[in-house]
Amino acid sequence: MAVNVYAPHRAKILNINRQTEIDYTFTLEADVKPLNGQFLEVSVPRVGECPISVSDFGEGYLELTIRRVGKVTNFIHDLKVGDSLFIRGPYGKGFPLAAFLGKRLIIAAGGTGLAPVKSVINNFCRNPGDIDKLDLLAGFKTPADVLFKAELQEWSKKFNVQVTVDKGDSSWSGRVGLITNLVKELTIENTDNTRVIIVGPPLMMKFTALEFINKSIPEKNIWFSFERKMCCGIGKCGHCKIDNTYVCLEGPVINYVQAKRLID
């Protein structure tokens, strides 16, 4: 019998962590073993399906950080612990962790872009000797939009973690301004030994990459992770296609040398 590649698997919700008013992290019971940076298609019967990046995973579980943005995600946000979601995948190409070994790794993440790189950071948090150094530059619109607050504090014990918001308030004593300002302040002595990951809104990724290039980081040392509407996940429907590139197949993680030619 032919295998139905669109058939999802039931995954029980083990925990729900409310990151912000509109961003919840769901821990699902699952034996799926994704690569860091891959995504799943998440569905609710008779409601719909949407692509979600895997924010973390381990033995018997995985985490999805889901923003309330429409019909499917609104329904998911109303689910409770013990309910189930349906998942298929993982899909796409993940981050090339082997390319980061022994290197200085700089991660620039804007908003929900922090979710796809969370497992990468946790991997090197558990194995700090695998890299030379890690810098995390995280930017959010406001203090209320900051994700993974507990993890940011934990990561800052081992790595250089800088968090900035576009607009502060009376509760915020940290940095205010664009993430590109954090890039400008970095001292990078060995650019050939430095690798960069950039994830976030398109304009943020574009101008953050230009700042790194201004610091003489080779283009081949920079990776993007695209957040696209990937419907089928297997290169059939074309919803995620940019020019001749199916992001669901060749991405979502794409090296800058290729990514800079993708005009949406």
Image (spheres, rainbow, N blue to C red):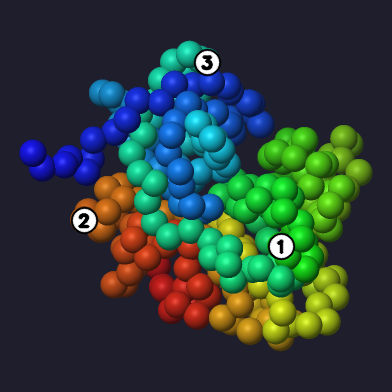
Circles 1 and 2: CB atoms closer than 8 Å: no
Q: What count of labels does the image hold?
A: 3
Residue at point 66%, 31% (across, down): 19
Q: Secondary structure at mark 1?
A: helix
Task: Residue at the far right: name it.
Answer: 173
Numbered badge on residue 236? 2
Q: Is residue 110 visible to us here?
A: no
Please, what is the three-letter code of the amino acid marked with disc 3?
Val
Residue 141 visible: yes
- Circle nearer the N terminus (3, 2): 3
Instruction: Identify the residue shown where x is 44% and y is 15%.
Output: 83
Q: Earlier in the sequence, mark 3 or mark 1?
A: 3
Horizontal and vertical percent position of residue 148: 70, 38
Q: CA separation, marks 1 and 2?
A: 38 Å
Calculate the distance from the C-alpha at mark 3 to the C-alpha at mark 1.
Answer: 36 Å
Q: CA distance from mark 3 to mark 2?
A: 34 Å
Residue designated by label 1? 130
Give the residue at x 17% y 40%. Answer: 4
The 10 Å Cα crowd at callout 2, few under 14, some 14 to 19, many 20 or more, is few
User: Which of label 3 and label 1 is nearer to you?
Assistant: 1
The residue most toward the left is: 1
Q: Nearer the viewer, residue 2 or 47?
A: 2
Is residue 103 positioned above or below 82 on the image? below
Residue located at (63% from left, 26% from top): 17
Which residue position holds label 3? 81
User: Residue 218, how many percent across, how many down?
Assistant: 63, 84
Nearest-to-viewer mark from 1 and 2: 1
For numbered disc 2, what is the local secondary structure?
loop
Question: Which x, y percent locates residue 71?
Answer: 38, 29
- Circle 3 residues within 10 Å: few <14, some 14–19, many ≥20: few
Q: In terms of sequence position, does the residue under pointer 1 or pointer 2 come before the other?
A: 1
Q: Position of residue 18 (x, y in %)?
A: 64, 26
